[in-house]
């Protein structure tokens, strides 16, 4: 999925970077957590492709957004109603 999106954006002559390393700074310390952005478009738009639940033919998944005040508010249950 990521490769297809990368291809389509590149065809539009957009500058696209794949698997761009993202440093994590926690309490003024840079941690090497190995996190990478799926896509960075024109240096300003982050694209995270999350199609793995469908790709693995799983029925359930969780989408977790850590950028919320209370973690339970950031958890969304995803049901794949049409497994392949």
Image (cartoon, rainbow, N blue to C red):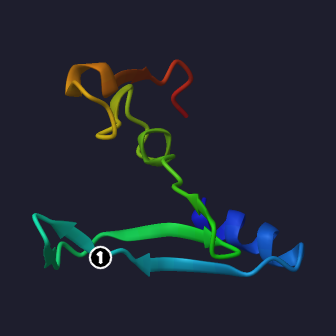
In the shown orientation, is residue 21 left or right of residue 82? left
Choose top left, top right, bottom left or bottom right for residue 33.
bottom left
- Residue annotated with mark 1: 23
Quadrant of the frame with the C terminus:
top right
Choose top left, top right, bottom left or bottom right for residue 17.
bottom right
Residue shown at 43%/38% (left/top)? 57
Locate residue 75, reporting x and y percent: 30, 25
Residue shown at 69%/71% (left/top)? 6
Q: Which residue extends farthest front?
A: 28
43 vs 1, nearest the viewer: 43
Residue shown at 63%/68% (left/top)? 44
Position of residue 50 relative to residue 43, above or below, is: above
Locate residue 21, reporting x and y percent: 38, 80
Choose top left, top right, bottom left or bottom right for residue 82.
top right
Q: Which residue extends farthest right?
A: 12
38 vs 7, nearest the viewer: 38
How dense is the environment of label 1, judged by Cα within 10 Å: few (below 14), some, or many (20 and up)?
Answer: few
Position of residue 69 relative to residue 24, above or below, is: above
In the shown orientation, is residue 42 left or right of residue 11? left
In the shown orientation, is residue 7 left or right of residue 82? right
55 vs 45, nearest the viewer: 45
Residue shown at 29%/76% (left/top)? 23
Position of residue 38 relative to residue 43, above or below, is: above
Locate residue 35, reporting x and y percent: 30, 70
- Disc 1 secondary structure class: loop
Quadrant of the frame with the N terminus:
bottom right
Locate residue 55, reporting x and y percent: 49, 47
Numbered disc total: 1
């Amino acid at each position: 999925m990521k490769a297809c999106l990368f291809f389509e954006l590149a065809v539009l002559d957009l500058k696209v970077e794949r698997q761009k390393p993202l440093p994590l700074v926690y309490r003024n310390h840079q941690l090497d957590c190995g996190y990478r952005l799926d896509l960075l478009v024109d240096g300003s738009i982050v694209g995270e492709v999350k199609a793995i639940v469908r790709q693995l033919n799983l029925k359930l998944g969780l989408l977790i957004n850590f950028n919320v005040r209370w973690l339970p508010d950031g958890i969304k249950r995803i049901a794949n109603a049409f497994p392949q």
